[in-house]
Amino acid sequence: QLQVEASGGGLVHTGGSLTLSCAASGFTLDYYAIGWFRQAPGKDREGVLCTSQGDTSTYYLDSVKGRFTISRDKAANLVYLQMNNLSPEDTAVYYCAADARITTIETMCVPDYRPFGSWGQGTRVTVSS
């Protein structure tokens, strides 16, 4: 079963930056499409940024374009979500997912996406105004 866990959340002021990490258990992230999702209080989970295997195609939620980027550390088997210029609207629990089934990256960052394994605990990001 594919299991990934997001970490690195915390409290940050508006305009600040935070880097989240996605770690995998028992498999190599580099061979999978990666998606970052978030769920704000009282709202549905949404896809924030998804990238294909090999990072040949990346989808960004409109509200994070120019502020969020994704990168892979192959040696450490980690994927990072770099979040800059954060605003209170970015406050949410963030999750990552790894998926080998994805052929079109836009089909991953959709509200009804379900990971092959579980969502994991997620990591909470709180942006204060």
Image (tube, rainbow, N blue to C red):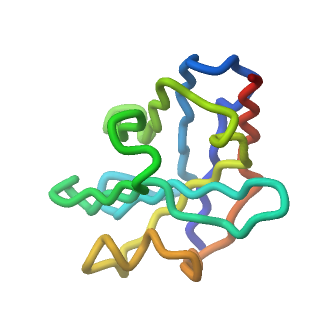
28 or 110, which is in the foreground?
Answer: 110
Q: Residue furthest left?
A: 56
Q: Quadrant of the C terminus?
A: top right
Percent position (x, y) of residue 120?
72, 59
Percent position (x, y) of residue 7?
66, 37
Question: Where 27 sits versus 112, above or below?
Answer: above
Question: Which of the 4 image quadrants contains residue 44?
Answer: bottom right
Decide if residue 85 is on the left or right side of residue 88: left
Decide if residue 12 is on the left or right side of residue 56: right
Residue under the image location 57 percent in, 28 percent down? 86
The number of discs equals 0
Question: Which of the 4 image quadrants contains residue 43?
Answer: bottom right
Q: Quadrant of the N terminus?
A: bottom right
69 or 22, which is in the foreground?
Answer: 69
Look at the image and tell me whether residue 28 can be seen: no
Residue under the image location 36 percent in, 54 percent down? 60
Question: Where 105 sits versus 4, above or below?
Answer: below
Look at the image and tell me whether residue 111 can be seen: yes
Residue under the image location 36 percent in, 37 percent down? 69
83 or 73, which is in the foreground?
Answer: 83
Residue under the image location 47 percent in, 25 percent down? 84
Question: Where 124 sits versus 43, above or below?
Answer: above
Question: Where 67 sits versus 51, above or below?
Answer: above
Percent position (x, y) of residue 50?
38, 59
